[in-house]
Image (cartoon, rainbow, N blue to C red):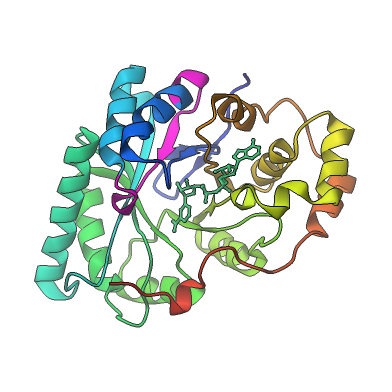
Amino acid sequence: MSTIPTVTLNNGVQIPQLGFGVWQVPDDEASSAVRTAIETGYRSIDTAAVYENEVGTGQGIQQAGAAREELFVTTKLWNSGKADWSGQAGRDAVLTAFDDSLKKLGLDYVDLYLIHWPRPMHGSYANIWKAFEQLQADGRAKAVGVSNFGQEQLTRLFETSSLVPALNQVELHPHFPQHELRAFHAEHGIATEAWSPLGQGKELLTDPALVAVAEKHGRTVAQVVLRWHLQSGIVAIPKSVTPSRIRENLDVTGFELDADDLAVIAAVETGKRLGPDPQGFDWN
Ligand code: NAD
């Protein structure tokens, strides 16, 4: 298995360009999935408080036995409507939620901590970000970033804080390539990370145009799509609990997409999201 390239974040921390996502993996299956992923060669794991599998993820990390400094662990704040995220009490609530995640993971730091959704209708993310500044300053999160933020929310953070998010994790795949947001990230030194990079294993992976590219290279469509992410400078975190797919999704460095392939992939864009539009998305 060839070595996975890294992306250098705006504070110098390096993130592997390919990681392993564990959304929808039950807590009691997460340990074996994460252990398999690390043993296969993944060095980056993406979980979240709301996935309710931080305990299993942490166990998988311990069982795999890789040195902590070789791993890149991401988790996310579930800034739900159940708490008030304003003022000092809101900032304290962030620190409490962070401590809870660390405890469940069995770690004493994470490599990346993200605000999971902006919930812009509540306007509390700028206050939450102040607590994130503290977590990074204390070295308990090596880098801090956001998820599902749009240009408007990123601009508001720039106005209220000198700490530019290291990364924004958003829905992104060839059907929904997020050109504008990626350009904005590049302008401001924010890394782009793709969630659902394989389009959740749905229509994207049977798209005839992508099947043709895959056949040309003697690869699978999943590998072509992940190769596209890597060549586009995007960090991708595909998920699978099937060991053969876990291996397949990491084995994407031994071939190169050419200009013709990239043109074919650019043409499959539909502009349709699989997930909710973060600008109007709220929950309790
Ligand atoms: P994904 O695009 O990674 O697709 C995963 C699905 O694709 C699997 O469940 C499986 O059905 C299929 N699959 C995987 N490998 C395959 C292969 N080689 N061949 C054929 N089918 C294959 O979707 P995802 O799980 O939604 O996203 C990946 C990760 O992104 C999540 O696990 C999570 O960590 C993160 N995520 C974050 C957010 C957020 O709001 N920040 C939202 C969704 C997902």
On the rendered structure, is 284 left or right of 220?
left
Side of 156 relative to 18 (left or right): left
Percent coordinates x, y for residue 254 in the rendering = 73, 25
Q: Is residue 49 magenta?
A: yes
Which quarter of the figure has residue 31? top left
Q: Residue 243 or 194: which is nearer the viewer?
A: 243
At a point 42% along the width and 75% down the height, the residue shown is 281
Quadrant in the picture for residue 68: top left
Question: In this image, 245 relative to 270: left or right?
Answer: left
Instruction: Decide if residue 205 is on the left or right side of residue 121.
Output: right
Above/below status of 149 relative to 75: below
The answer to whether 274 is drawn above or below residue 38 in the figure is below
- Residue 237 in view, yes or no: yes
Q: Nearer the viewer, residue 189 or 23?
A: 23
Quarter placement of the C terminus: bottom left
Eyeballing the image, is 104 above or below 130?
above
| Residue found at x 30% / y 80% | 123
State the extent of the magenta-drawn residues as a range: 38-52
Q: Position of residue 65 (x, y in %)?
A: 33, 16
Residue, x 65% and y 46% (percent of image)? Answer: 229
Q: Position of residue 137 (x, y in %)?
A: 22, 50
Task: Assess whether residue 17 is covered by the magenta stretch.
Answer: no
Looking at the rendered image, the quarter that the N terminus falls into is: top right
